[in-house]
Image (tube, rainbow, N blue to C red):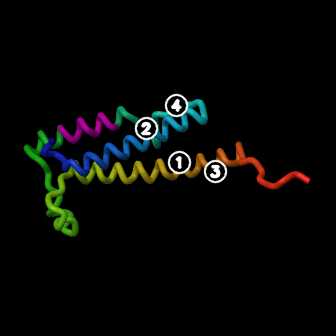
Amino acid sequence: MSPLTHFSVACLGLIAFLIAFVYTLITAQTRATMRITYFYFDPTEIRALLFLGNLLTLAVGGVIDLRPWLPSLARLGPISIHDFGIALLSLAGVAAISALAIGDSRTLSVEDPPPSTRPEP
């Protein structure tokens, strides 16, 4: 395990990634397009953020604990800047993918309405 983030927060990031991955596969099947960028954020930016997080840790000389700046979250135990960033991006990602999925479902329902259940006269 990494000392930079808690396992539960890393799992939250993985779940958000898998939700985006599955949504991409479903959209690729229904729309015949493979979208890998959402809101100008793609795998390259994720790698850049990981790189910058590691550089920050090396520059500071250790893990940055946010308890002094976030006293309301101090009861949860130590919260690193990596925990905070991963949780924030994961929640924003899940919310964004949910909004996109709702929009796509409305568009698909207009393009391909369900069959009528009324009997024909």
22 lies above or below 91:
above
Q: Amino acid at mark 3?
A: Arg
Q: Residue at x 60, y 34 (%)?
A: 31
Residue for badge 3: 106
Q: Residue at x 58, y 50 (%)?
A: 103
Q: Residues within 10 Å of mark 3 (few under 14, many from 20)?
A: few
Q: Amino acid at mark 2?
A: Phe
Do labels 1 and 4 touch, CB within 8 Å?
Answer: no
Magenta span has 49? yes
49 lies above or below 6:
above
In the rendered structure, which segment of residues is drawn in magenta? 46-54
- First in sequence, mark 4 or 2: give its number: 2
Q: Position of residue 81 (x, y in %)?
A: 20, 51
Q: Residues within 10 Å of mark 1 (few under 14, many from 20)?
A: some
Q: Residue at x 14, y 55 (%)?
A: 65
Residue for badge 4: 34
Q: Amino acid at mark 4?
A: Met
Magenta span has 104? no
Do labels 2 and 1 touch, CB within 8 Å?
Answer: no
